[in-house]
Amino acid sequence: MRCRLGRADLTAVAEARRALRELLRHWGQPDCTDVAELLTSELVTNALIHTESDAELTATLAASTLRVEVRDQLSRMPEPRLASCDENTHGRGLLLVQALADAWGVRMQGHGPGKVVWFELDGGRAGT
């Protein structure tokens, strides 16, 4: 699955979740669907809020593993940070990814500016 995400278009978050849900409906790993949608929402939201360009979401299934990648044009590395104690809702996304994904990371694009933030879920480990 591949989706273009328009610059600062936060309606793309819901559209990305729907597309991912459709992909996962055929995967046979229902225990991973909610986590996959949550983590995808976090990465897509980060790309749309913290960059000033379009982004691209890619999700692939291989056996029991789901890999989701969000590519943006910002070369600055994201940093998981503790959210402040006030009512600010920012700062928790990468902490959720770090806590819930089986693997995650960031790689700089080899050609031009930008990076890819990714996570993987191992459906074979769901419920264990």
Image: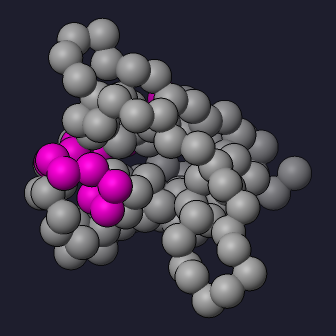
Residue at 66% x, 34% y: name it: 103
Rendered residue at 21%/45% (across/down): 55
Q: Magenta region: which residues? A: 48-62
Q: Residue at x 16, y 68 (%)?
A: 9
As rendered, which of 88 and 92 lies closer to the eye? 88
- Who's the residue at 87% across and 51% down the image? 128
**Is 52 part of what is drawn in magenta?**
yes
Residue 101 versus residue 17 in the image, above or below: above
- Residue at the bottom extreme, as displayed: 87
Q: Is residue 35 visible?
A: no
Task: Tell me if 14 is positioned left or right of 95 in this view.
Answer: left
Name the quadrant containing residue 13: bottom left
Can the viewer see residue 81?
A: yes
Q: Residue 25's quadrant in the figure?
A: bottom left
Outermost residue to the right: 128
**Image position of 116 with respect to 18: above or below:** above
Residue 44, position as x, y percentages in the image: 36, 56
Q: Position of residue 125 (x, y in %)?
A: 77, 43
> Does residue 84 show up magenta in the picture?
no
